[in-house]
Image (tube, rainbow, N blue to C red):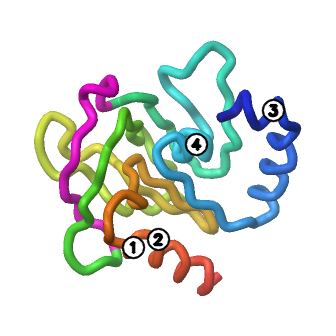
């Protein structure tokens, strides 16, 4: 994504817009692109930044390790069905970052999979898969309250 943004001269304008306050929601690779720090990235890999998090790429494993499960999401009633496709997770979140969801059980129990900081939000899972639009509505409500 970074290579494409640079190839089409979009990288710097997007960084400027994000830093200028444009509400932005990143899912999966979008979480990587909004992270200030990356682990296990390709040599020289960068990001737009904006969220004070350290993200580990492909943290749950390879494509064959993709999975689905329910996570509790702060501010929403009832769990969200989360689809993780070769997903990252947050290794570390800064003081100004609100943790919205964590993996509830298993080997990755407690890992951070959704965050928000100011006008930016990111999930390591794909809320656009399926019928539940609550995560997207949550982001829209956040934007409207700003």
Measure the C-alpha gap from mark 2 to mark 4. 19 Å
Which residue is under mark 3?
Answer: 6
Measure the C-alpha gap from mark 3 to mark 1. 31 Å
Q: Is residue 80 above or below residue 46?
A: below
Q: Mark 3 or mark 4, which is nearer to you?
A: 3
Which of the marked residues, 4 or 1, is nearer the chain's N terminus? 4
Q: Are marks 3 and 4 in contact (CB under 8 Å)?
A: no
Residue found 32% across the figure and 44% down from its top: 84
Measure the C-alpha gap from mark 3 to mark 4. 17 Å
Measure the C-alpha gap from mark 4 to mark 1. 24 Å
Residue furthest top in the image: 43
Counting every numbered tag in the picture gives 4
Tag 3's secondary structure?
Answer: helix
Tag 2's secondary structure?
Answer: helix
Which residue is under mark 4?
Answer: 35
Mark 3 closeness class: few <14, some 14–19, many ≥20 residues within 10 Å: few
Which of the marked residues, 3 or 4, is nearer the chain's N terminus? 3
Please give the label number shown on residue 133.
1
Residue found 58% across the figure and 42% down from its top: 35
Who is closer to the viewer here, 31 or 117?
31
Measured as percent of width and height from the top left, residue 31 is found at: 52, 46
Which of the marked residues, 3 or 2, is nearer the chain's N terminus? 3
Quadrant assignment for the N terminus: top right
On whether residue 130 falls in the magenta region, the answer is: no
Measured as percent of width and height from the top left, residue 144 is found at: 62, 85
Q: Are marks 3 and 1 in contact (CB under 8 Å)?
A: no
Q: Which residues are magenta?
A: 60-74
Picture quadrant where residue 36 is located: top right
């Amino acid at each position: 994504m970074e290579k494409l943004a640079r190839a089409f001269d979009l990288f710097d304008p997007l960084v400027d817009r994000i830093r200028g306050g444009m509400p932005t929601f990143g899912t999966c690779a979008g979480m990587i692109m909004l992270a200030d720090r990356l682990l296990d990235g390709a040599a020289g890999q960068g990001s737009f930044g904006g969220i004070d998090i350290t993200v580990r790429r492909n943290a749950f494993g390879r494509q064959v390790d993709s999975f689905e499960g329910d996570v509790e999401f702060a501010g929403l009633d009832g769990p969200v069905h989360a689809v993780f496709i070769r997903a990252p997770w947050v290794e570390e979140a800064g003081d100004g970052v609100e943790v919205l969801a964590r993996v509830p059980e298993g080997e990755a129990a407690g890992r951070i999979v959704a965050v928000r900081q100011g006008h930016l939000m990111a999930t390591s899972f794909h809320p656009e898969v399926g019928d539940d639009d609550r995560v997207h509505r949550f982001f829209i409500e956040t934007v409207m309250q700003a």
